Image (cartoon, helix red, strand yellow):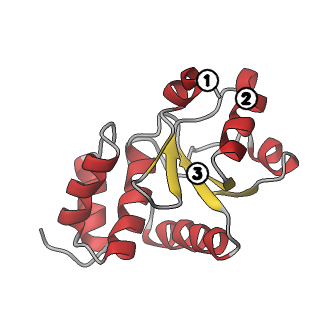
C-alpha cells in the first residue's frame, strides 16, 4: 500500500490501540482509501464532519459507519461524545478496529481520540492531551476542545 495515501489522509493508529485517526477521504480515492483501511484491519468508520458525504459508500464497502456531526474547530456535545464513544466501543466489541475522521483529522478527530485514550488508559484530560500529542503529533486541539475534554473527563487541569 502506497505511503502517499497514508500521508494524504494523515492516517495513523494511536500507539498500539485499535483506534486510528485520519482526514476525510477523497471521493476520487475512495476505493484506495477503503483498501488501505481494510489492510489495517479497520472495520468501523466514525465520521465527524458536519455533512456525511460518504457514509453510504463506507456502508456499501462493508464498513460499520456512524456519523456524529461536529462543527469545525468545535468540540462535540456531551451527548455527541457519548454516542461517538459508544460506536467505537460497539465496533471494538465486534473485533473491528475503528478509524475516526473529520475534514483534516486534527481537531475534532483529536478530541474524540483524546477522550477515548483518557478512558482507556485512566488518564486525566491534561495527561491524555499530552499523550495524544506524543502519539499523533498533528493533533491540534482548540481551547474550546481542550476545555470540553477537561469538563467531560471531570478534570480541572
Q: Dividing the image into 4 quarters, which one contains the C terminus? A: bottom left
Residue under the image location 29 percent in, 78 percent down: 122
Give the CA distance from mark 3 to mark 2.
15 Å
Residue 69: x and y, percent? 57, 52
On screen, residue 153 versus residue 25, left or right, reads left
Q: Is residue 77 above or below residue 105?
A: below
Looking at the image, do the residues carrying marks 3 and 2 touch, with CB atoms under 8 Å apart?
A: no
Quadrant of res 139: top left
On screen, residue 58 versus residue 70, left or right, reads right
Give the CA distance from mark 3 to mark 1.
18 Å
What is the secondary structure assignment of the residue under circle 1?
Answer: loop
Looking at the image, do the residues carrying marks 3 and 1 touch, with CB atoms under 8 Å apart?
A: no
Near-viewer residue (127 or 78) = 127
Of label 3 and label 1, which has the lower sequence position?
A: 1
Near-viewer residue (52 or 20) = 20
Q: Dividing the image into 4 quarters, which one contains the N terminus? A: top right
- Neighbour tally class for label 2: few under 14, some 14-19, many 20 plus, Cα within 10 Å: some
Q: Nearer the viewer, mark 3 or mark 1?
A: 1
What residue does disc 2 label?
Answer: 32
Residue under the image location 23 percent in, 61 percent down: 147
Looking at the image, do the residues carrying marks 2 and 1 touch, with CB atoms under 8 Å apart?
A: yes
On screen, residue 116 versus residue 137, left or right, reads right
Near-viewer residue (121 or 54) = 121
What residue does disc 1 label?
Answer: 2
What residue does disc 3 label?
Answer: 99
What is the secondary structure assignment of the residue under circle 2?
Answer: helix
Amino acid at each position: 500500500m502506497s505511503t502517499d495515501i497514508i500521508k494524504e489522509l494523515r492516517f495513523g493508529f494511536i500507539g498500539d490501540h485499535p483506534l486510528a485517526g485520519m482526514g476525510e477521504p477523497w471521493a476520487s480515492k475512495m476505493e484506495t482509501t477503503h483498501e488501505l483501511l481494510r489492510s489495517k484491519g479497520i472495520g468501523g468508520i466514525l465520521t465527524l464532519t458536519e455533512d456525511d458525504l460518504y457514509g453510504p459508500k463506507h456502508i456499501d464497502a462493508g464498513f460499520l459507519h456512524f456519523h456524529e456531526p461536529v462543527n469545525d474547530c468545535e468540540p462535540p456535545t456531551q451527548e455527541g461524545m457519548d454516542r461517538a464513544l459508544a460506536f467505537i466501543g460497539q465496533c471494538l466489541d465486534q473485533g473491528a478496529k475503528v478509524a475516526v475522521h473529520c475534514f483534516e483529522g486534527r481537531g475534532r478527530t483529536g478530541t474524540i481520540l483524546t477522550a477515548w485514550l483518557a478512558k482507556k488508559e485512566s488518564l486525566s484530560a491534561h495527561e491524555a492531551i499530552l499523550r495524544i500529542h506524543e502519539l499523533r503529533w498533528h493533533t491540534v486541539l482548540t481551547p474550546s476542545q481542550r476545555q470540553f475534554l477537561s469538563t467531560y473527563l471531570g478534570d480541572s487541569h
